Amino acid sequence: MPPILCLGADLKNTFCLVRGEQAVVSQHLGDLSDDGIQAQWREALRLIQSIYDFTPERIVCDAHPGYVSSQWASEMRLPTETVLHHHAHAAACLAEHGWPLDGGEVIALTVDGIGMGENGALWGGECLRVNYRECEHLGGLPAVALPGGDLAAKQPWRNLLAQCLRFVPDWQDYPETAGLQQQNWSVLARAIERGVNSPLASSCGRLFDAVAAALRCAPASLSYEGEAACALEALASQCANVEHPVTMPLNGAQLDVAVFWRQWLNWQATPAQRAWAFHDALACGFATLMRQQATARGITTLVFSGGVIHNRLLRARLAFYLSDFKLLFPQRLPAGDGGLSFGQGVIAAARALSEV
């Protein structure tokens, strides 16, 4: 098997050197859109390859062609392989737990902000059939517009607007949406309708942002991605085991978010109780989908990864609903993008071994 350099993703970047039976993951490097971080990243690549006397013969990068790391890979004049973002998330967790190469398939839940999926789709709330060499998309969250593109990850109210326009026809009648009236929402609504700078994404992270915006537990503009989700989890953690009428049932292989919004907006409860109910309904919906897909295939092991899996309450509720399965959660490596380079390395190594 040739030495492989795996470049990870552009956010929370790490890279990984794979040679023989060893994989070396770099330190956390950060956001490669920053010129200073890019310089540190290039120096770290040079230094660590020198320390390990490592000369790559193959490059692996994320499937997103716009990533700095992907563009750098194309300049290296070496055989280059792309790996789907969420396949790498799942594979990293599998390998961390010592899942054997011939261990068969598992069902994975990969939930995060955004990542490149099949055929250019933007994923972030996916149920997958996975082994080390391949993955198959089975279902998950429906795709919703990201109004303003990258701004949607920084301003939660944009995601609340997108969810309301898609799933709540009478959204202006609810007090939870009053904050949208203070924004220039009609311009964004027209942009969404016309598909202008409003890509569709099945993002679990942006759904968290929307609920946080509805409960007004996060600032209008975030300091970092995930801030709104952290605030929502903290609010939900003020109570436990709340009885509630809120569900996120399946509609085919997708979670029916329209049902959730209708029930949740019409349920009178404290903000903490409503935050807890959201976590519970989301976990129950995902668990139902995973159970359905696993049972149909005789699979008994489930894998969880992606940045949203850092949420302890969501993890606990998933474990509650799926306690009769073998559950694998990230432990030593980050659930988020910091573990991607290792997942890329595992996938590339498995594919290389199948070529021998």
Image (cartoon, rainbow, N blue to C red):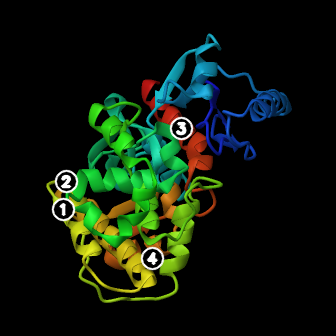
Per the model, the C-alpha gap separating discs 4 and 3 is 27 Å
Judging by the rendered image, the residue that carries numbered circle 3 is: 344
Query: Compared with residue 314, is residue 162 higher up or lower down, i.e. above or below?
Result: above
- Location of residue 43 in the rendering, given as x and y in whole percent from the top left corner: 82, 29
Judging by the rendered image, the residue that carries numbered circle 4 is: 316
**Left or right relative to 83: residue 37:** right
- Location of residue 273 in the rendering, given as x and y in whole percent from the top left corner: 40, 84
Judging by the rendered image, the residue that carries numbered circle 2 is: 253
Per the model, the C-alpha gap separating discs 3 and 1 is 31 Å
Per the model, the C-alpha gap separating discs 3 and 2 is 27 Å
Q: Do the residues bearing badges 3 and 1 touch, measured as CB atoms within 8 Å?
A: no
The type of residue carrying mark 3 is: Gln
Q: Earlier in the sequence, mark 4 or mark 3?
A: 4
Residue 1 visible somewhere in the drawing = no
Q: Earlier in the sequence, mark 3 or mark 1?
A: 1
Q: Nearer the viewer, mark 3 or mark 1?
A: 1
Q: Quadrant of residue 327?
A: bottom left
Query: Compared with residue 3, is residue 87 higher up or lower down, i.e. above or below?
Result: below
Using a 10 Å C-alpha cutoff, classify the residue at mark 3 as few (fewer than 14 neighbours), some (14 to 19) or many (20 or more): many
Per the model, the C-alpha gap separating discs 4 and 1 is 21 Å
Judging by the rendered image, the residue that carries numbered circle 1 is: 250
**Left or right relative to 108: residue 152:** right
The type of residue carrying mark 2 is: Ala
**Left or right relative to 284: residue 77:** right
Q: Do the residues bearing badges 1 and 2 touch, measured as CB atoms within 8 Å?
A: yes
Using a 10 Å C-alpha cutoff, classify the residue at mark 2 as few (fewer than 14 neighbours), some (14 to 19) or many (20 or more): some
Residue 117 visible somewhere in the drawing = yes
Per the model, the C-alpha gap separating discs 1 and 2 is 6 Å
